[in-house]
Image: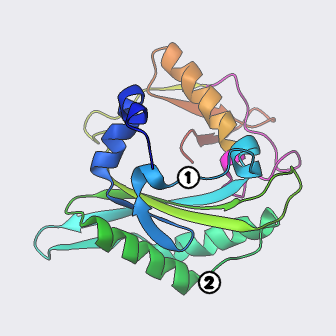
Amino acid sequence: MIPSKWDQEHPVWTEWSEAVRYVWMNGELVPFLHAQMPVMSTACRSGVNVFEGIRAYWNEEHGKLYVFRVREHYQRLIESMRIMHMPRPEGEAEMEALLLETLRANRFRTDVHIIHTVYVDAPGAEALGPIGMYIVARPLGRLHTLEHGITCGVSSWLRMPDQATPFRAKSGGNYLNTRLGGIEARQHGYDAAIFLNTRGKVAEGGGA
């Protein structure tokens, strides 16, 4: 049971729990604030997870959500698991079915952003399993309008080469780089960061 003190001291999470009815986590749908993992798991300590950020768009005329390129997202998620030496908990079709189950449970009637995460649910930097999995979907429209665009600054932080850490895998640990560049960009008055690689060439934006 989540203590009420949590809600009082963490208003951001209260807002999330109001927007997100249920999270799919390790075999069941649970209320948002009840989705938890062990604090000593390597996922918590070292960011050992892989994930996909997936969009679903509400069509008012059809009364349906349409998930964008879901099969391609799960192909990439499975490839990220392979790169990070994580055993695959489900196949593409099974993971897609779990995503749809999560969307139906939350009864969204607006555009949605979905995070499907697979993580190592054990202590130890070199642990390979067991594997945990969760799906969080929340209402989210466009962050910026096409008419106004965004301002970007070139970050002093470089995109790490694949020889140092596999950026071709969409892994949570890789996003420390994104976090630092994003904070730096905001401190200098920009909306977002542009990262160069170690050769001084443009590599990507912060949300890639």
Is 208 displayed left or right of 158 in the figure? left
Relative vertical location of residue 10 with respect to residue 172 in this rendering, above or below: above
The number of discs equals: 2
Question: Which mark is drawn over residue 112?
Answer: none
- Amino acid residing under circle 1: Gln
Where's residue 190, x and y in %? 46, 21
Residue pictured at 74% horizontal, 51% vertical: 41
Note whether residue 167 is visible. Answer: no
The residue carrying mark 1 is 36
Residue pictured at 72% horizontal, 57% vertical: 168
User: What secondary structure is marked by label 1?
Assistant: loop
Relative vertical location of residue 172 with respect to residue 78 in this rendering, above or below: above
Question: Which mark is drawn over residue 91?
Answer: 2
Q: CA distance from mark 2 to mark 1?
A: 24 Å
- Amino acid residing under circle 2: Gly
In this picture the colour scheme is: rainbow
User: From which residue to which does the magenta span run?
Assistant: 155-173
Front residue of 109 and 40: 40
Where's residue 24, x and y in %? 47, 66
User: What secondary structure is marked by label 2?
Assistant: loop
Where's residue 181, x and y in %? 62, 28
**Which one is earlier in the sequence, the residue at label 2 or at label 1?**
1
Q: Is residue 168 magenta?
A: yes
Circle 1: is it few (<14), some (14-19), or many (20+) Cα within 10 Å?
few
